[in-house]
Image (cartoon, rainbow, N blue to C red):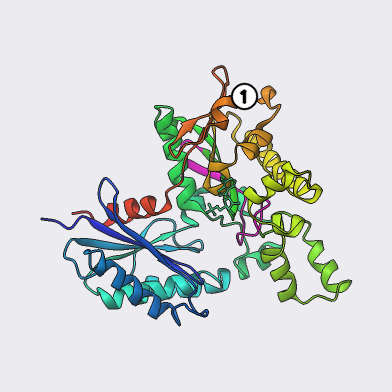
Amino acid sequence: MNPTRVLVLNSGSSSVKYQLLHMPHGDRLASGMVERIGEDGGPADHDAAFKLVAGELTDDGVGIDSPELAAVGHRVVHGGTRFTEPTVIDDGVLAAIQELVPLAPLHNPANITGIKVARELRPDLPQVAVFDTAFHSTMPEYAARYAIDRQTADTYHVRRYGFHGTSHAYVSRAVAGLLAKDPSEVNVIVLHLGNGASASAVRGGVCVDTSMGLTPLEGLVMGTRSGDLDPAVVFHLARVGGMSVDDIDTLLNKKSGLLGLCGDNDMRNIGHRMAEGDEAARLAFDVYVHRVRKYIGAYTAVLGRVDAIVFTAGVGENSAAVREASLRDLGSLGIEVDTVRNALRAKTARLISAAGSRVAVAVVPTDEELEIAQQTYSLVEQ
Ligand code: AMP
């Protein structure tokens, strides 16, 4: 009997999440998370964290040494321009992921550690890297290029890569299914609104633009990231504010977005505060939604014809208020939301557009682990 289980590892800077899935259907056999790596009360480092994951799997009766395991699928944040497909990891691939560390200094090192430990634990198994950037590698050159000196850009690999790719891939395919169409037949705007947030324009299953760029800082307003701003803000803060590059990096990535605007990065709390008349929370919500609307307009123009707009991730799946405000009064673009359907809470993929809406509006719970498992399994399936 061929092995049919895939272990998905998502190794972040301070946590390791894992799921064990039974393929090809993707039933979940085990899942968990080891947190606070390197912090008080947590494992000392990623090595220790992976040993804990291996222990938890054994406790669940599905040990890492199981012969039913077909492969390990690793989420890898940055694949640069080299990795446009899921890739079986060998020493050369690992070295290439290492070379991309300057482009993703917070993420790729943790991903590499995860790969190394999993290889040590199961040297016989295929280890597959699934890249967050890969789905966006189809962007045309004019969408991927910044309008800066070409030689400088090429020397330092400065271009738009995009992130959250497994989510955009999964959700754009799922919405086609919801419309009983093949992905190649539909043009979709995906709004992945979580703690990190990104939008993408997907034409016939192929990504043609996305809001994140060289790093996940560009684009939409996020929990703690500013998203788009005039790059001269950086020079101004350095020259006039006397801030260092690292200070500004921390400000824009960790102290901005919703948190910077109102002191709260959780949309639930912002909703509660708005209900009590809190002005700062209202402004944060309005800035957030205004940016989402701008991207909907931009991607409508990029795509020409939009068949569906789909909301996903923590805010997109749960906040009826954000969805309603993002699409309010867009009847001239053929977008009409059914307020009753929008307000219904559900955990399943669903349409929330009004019966006559030319553009379908949907909420689709994202499932990055399932997408990683499917891409991994498709490479190793015998
Ligand atoms: P994610 O990164 O996809 O896990 O999304 C996390 C974010 O989703 C949180 O920071 C919250 O802002 C948001 N979120 C989760 N649940 C809700 C909810 N019921 N209503 C509004 N926002 C929510």
Picture quadrant of residue 301: top right
The residue singled out by tag 1 in the image is 336
Give the residues drawn in magenta, as a range: 203-223
Placement of the N terminus among the 4 image quadrants: bottom left
Picture quadrant of residue 259: bottom right
Drawn side of residue 193 relative to residue 54, left or right: right
Does the beta carbon at disc 1 come under 8 Å from ligand 1? no
Drawn side of residue 225 relative to residue 278, left or right: left
Placement of the C terminus among the 4 image quadrants: bottom left
Residue 19 in sight here: no
Q: Residue furthest right?
A: 240
Predominant SS along the magenta part: loop
Residue count near mark 1 (Cα–Cα under 10 Å), binned few <14, some 14–19, many ≥20: many
Asked if residue 120 is positioned above or below residue 377 in the image, the reply reads: below
| Element class at badge 1 | loop
Nearer to me, 118 or 102: 118
Where residue 304 appears, as percent x and y from the top left, is: 61, 30
Counting every numbered tag in the picture gives: 1
Asked if residue 279 is positioned above or below residue 361 in the image, the reply reads: below
Residue 63 lies in the magenta stretch: no
Q: Residue furthest left?
A: 1
Where residue 82 appears, as percent x and y from the top left, is: 46, 63
The kind of residue tagged 1 is Glu
Nearer to me, 104 or 361: 361
Asked if residue 372 is positioned above or below residue 332 in the image, the reply reads: below
Residue 274 in sight here: yes
Seen at 37% across and 72% down, the residue is 115
Nearer to me, 351 or 116: 351
Nearer to me, 139 or 135: 135
